[in-house]
Amino acid sequence: MLAYCRTLLATCDTMAISDYTRQVAGLHGKALDPSEFNRLLGLARMVGIPAADTNQLRAVKSYYRVLSFAERLLPSRSPQVLQWIERELSRCTYFAAVSLDRRLVPVAN
């Protein structure tokens, strides 16, 4: 599952989020705050999730939860590991924003 999620995140890293979606979702900058993950995922669900995307979103959501749990468990003496986790959480959030964008852009046109 780890490799699958990291592949999904890497794929999304290269995708741009439209100005329309950024405006609708209130997003600023490429790096997104990990705390926005659930909100963006909720917005994507409200717009509608195609059946083909359900497994991808479920996998990334599970990955996000595991990372969040690990972040709380790790001692603060591991700054490099915590930085990596924070980057991965931010990538999960970006994935959620890209998922939202794929749903909103066809609606906007």
Image: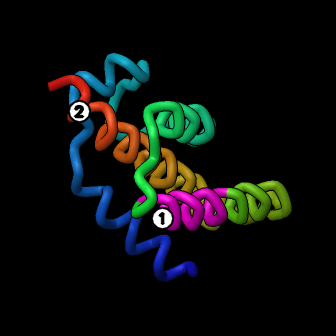
Q: Position of residue 40 (x, y in %)?
A: 51, 35
Would you say the residues marked 2 and 1 are in contact, meaning their CB atoms lie under 8 Å apart?
no
Q: Is residue 68 left or right of residue 95?
A: right
Quadrant holding the C terminus? top left
Kindly identify the amino acid type of the residue bearing the numbered disc 1. Answer: Gln
Q: Where is residue 71 in the image (x, y as percent from the top left)?
A: 74, 58
Say few, some or many: other residues with alpha carbon within 10 Å of mark 1 (under 14 / 14 to 19 / 20 or more). Answer: some
Q: Main secondary structure of the magenta part?
A: helix
Residue 18 sits in which quadrant?
A: top left
Q: Is residue 66 left or right of residue 81?
A: right
Q: Could you tell me which residue is drawn at 54 percent across and 41 percent down?
A: 41
Pick the residue in front: 47 or 79.
47
Q: In this view, does 75 lie to the left or right of 2?
A: right
Provide the secondary structure element on which disc 2 rests.
helix
> What separation in Å lies between label 2 and label 1 (alpha carbons)?
19 Å
Q: Tell me, for residue 56, which label it has, or none.
A: 1
Pick the residue in front: 70 or 21.
21
Which contiguous range is marked in magenta? 53-64
54 vs 29: above or below: below
Pick the residue in front: 76 or 25.
25
Residue found at the far left of this picture: 109
Magenta highlight on residue 34: no
Q: Where is residue 96 in the image (x, y as percent from the top left)?
A: 46, 46
Q: Could you tell me which residue is drawn at 57 percent across and 81 percent down?
A: 1
Provide the secondary structure element on which disc 1 rests.
helix
